[in-house]
Image (cartoon, rainbow, N blue to C red):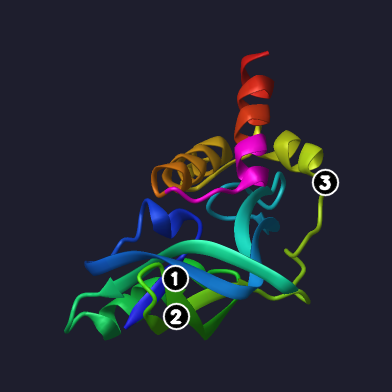
Amino acid sequence: MWVFGYGSLLWNPGFEVAEQAVARLDGWHRSFCMRSIHHRGTVEAPGLVLALDAEVGAHCQGLALKVAEGHEARTLDYLRERELVSSAYLEETLPLTLRDGRDVEAVTYVIDPDHVQYCHLSLDEQARIISTAVGGRGPNTEYLHNTASHLFELGIEDADLKWLSQEVRRLTTA
């Protein structure tokens, strides 16, 4: 069983990983398009978390995480508890192409565009929200900076996350 990580699963999978590889998912892009009312914000002051938003011609590079043999059911239970807390994500099994050319299918969490937590905001507005939001798992800034730094370490370019990380640092040190 493979899982596709494109946000916090990059740096905090929470399950035993037997193998990992940079992977590409076609038809989706990484975006701060989900309001977070649990992990990185509250109902009163929502933060933002990453989700995969469908877009023709787009692609997202992330990390394919192979679940250790014998841990599949436990991992799926864990991921469902973690990722489906508010039903804003939909669980899909989608095809990935690994950097070494292998094709695999992976459990992937994508945004439900009809869910109330779905949003489409400018990068400036995203930076403003992320710079102040805090939820049950900590500051929204931590989520952004950890994700951006792990993408960089993996050699994955994401211009929006790079800009957001720089802008949020500017906002929080001004």
* Crowd rating for badge 2 (residues with CA inside 10 Å; few <14, some 14–19, many 20+): some
Residue underneath mark 3: 122
Quarter of the image where one finds residue 16? bottom left
Q: CA distance from mark 3 to mark 1?
A: 26 Å
Residue underneath mark 2: 107
**Amino acid marked by disc 3:** Ser
Quarter of the image where one finds residue 125? top right
Give the quadrant of the C terminus.
top right
Q: Residue furthest top?
A: 174
113 part of magenta stretch: no
Residue range of the region highlighted in magenta in the rendering: 155-164
Q: Nearer the viewer, residue 85 or 147?
A: 147
**Amino acid marked by disc 1:** Phe
Give the quadrant of the N terminus.
bottom left
**Amino acid marked by disc 2:** Val
Residue underneath mark 1: 4
Q: CA distance from mark 3 to mark 2?
A: 29 Å
